[in-house]
Image (cartoon, coloured by chain):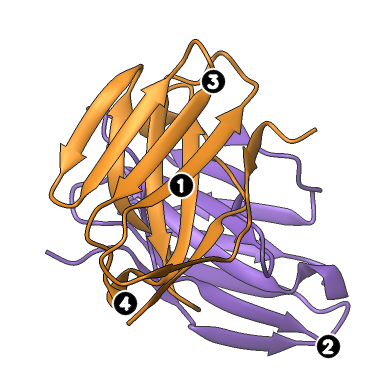
Amino acid sequence: DAGVTQSPTHLIKTRGQQVTLRCSPKSGHDTVSWYQQALGQGPQFIFQYYEEEERQRGNFPDRFSGHQFPNYSSELNVNALLLGDSALYLCASSFSGTRETQYFGPGTRLLVL
Amino acid sequence: QKEVEQDPGPLSVPEGAIVSLNCTYSNSAFQYFMWYRQYSRKGPELLMYTYSSGNKEDGRFTAQVDKSSKYISLFIRDSQPSDSATYLCAMSADTGRRALTFGSGTRLQVQP
């Protein structure tokens, strides 16, 4: 039973560029959440997708956008990258039909130069 | 003031010691409480998941929730060097249906 997978594992971009990160949820899960984890900090909630729609959003600017596909996989897009966007980006999945909590993937480490 | 406060450590203990990790929170809407373990440069791994107040035990791990004090704890018995990691507490008003709010994590080092 595959857990949450993310790609790529590492990414280097320059300021102003755009990036797309990808996530496949754990088998049986239909809800995907994205988190940003800066070095030495806990993860911060970006947004959550369910039924291909953004259901909840954290305190992140519109430069951060996402998408969920019919197979429940998801993408996180960040436009006009800033140095401060350098972080570990974590995808978490859960199943809406239970009180189960979220399970995390290994993350994508983004470095903005 | 952050919604969830957690001592960043590092906490250094000898192998075999009992470890106590704690978080306090301010949002009374939180009903679900989690502890995740995160090794360096890896994703968080779920350790314990509890609902409302009370205790839950799983092997060497015990989670306690005191909603009246807005205080949660994780105890690790017979700590091992492999327990060396960052421990994150997380909370939610509605399980996986809503955002998790995390503490900043406590770094634990278990010395052999």
User: Does B75 sit above or below residue A15?
Assistant: above
Q: Amino acid at mark 4?
A: Pro
Going from the N terminus, do you reach mark 1 or mark 4 first? 1
Q: Chain of mark 1?
A: B
Residue at label 2? A113
Residue at label 4? B81
At a point 62% along the width and 86% down the height, the residue shown is: A11
Q: Amino acid at mark 2?
A: Leu
Chain A appears what colour? Answer: purple
Pointer 3 and pointer 2: residues touching (CB < 8 Å)?
Answer: no
Going from the N terminus, do you reach mark 1 or mark 3 first? 1
Q: Amino acid at mark 1?
A: Leu
Q: CA distance from mark 1 to mark 3?
A: 14 Å
Residue B76 % position (x, y): 29, 52
Which tag is nearer the camera, tag 2 or tag 1? 1
User: Does A9 sit above or below residue A60?
Assistant: below
Residue A88 % position (x, y): 60, 70
Q: Amino acid at mark 3?
A: Lys
Residue A38 % position (x, y): 69, 65
Residue at label 3? B70
Which tag is nearer the camera, tag 1 or tag 3? 1
Which element carries disc 3, helix, strand or loop? loop
Q: CA distance from mark 4 to mark 3?
A: 30 Å
Q: Quadrant of residue B95?
A: top left
Q: Is residue B53 visible?
A: yes
Q: Is residue A53 visible?
A: no
Q: CA distance from mark 1 to mark 4?
A: 16 Å
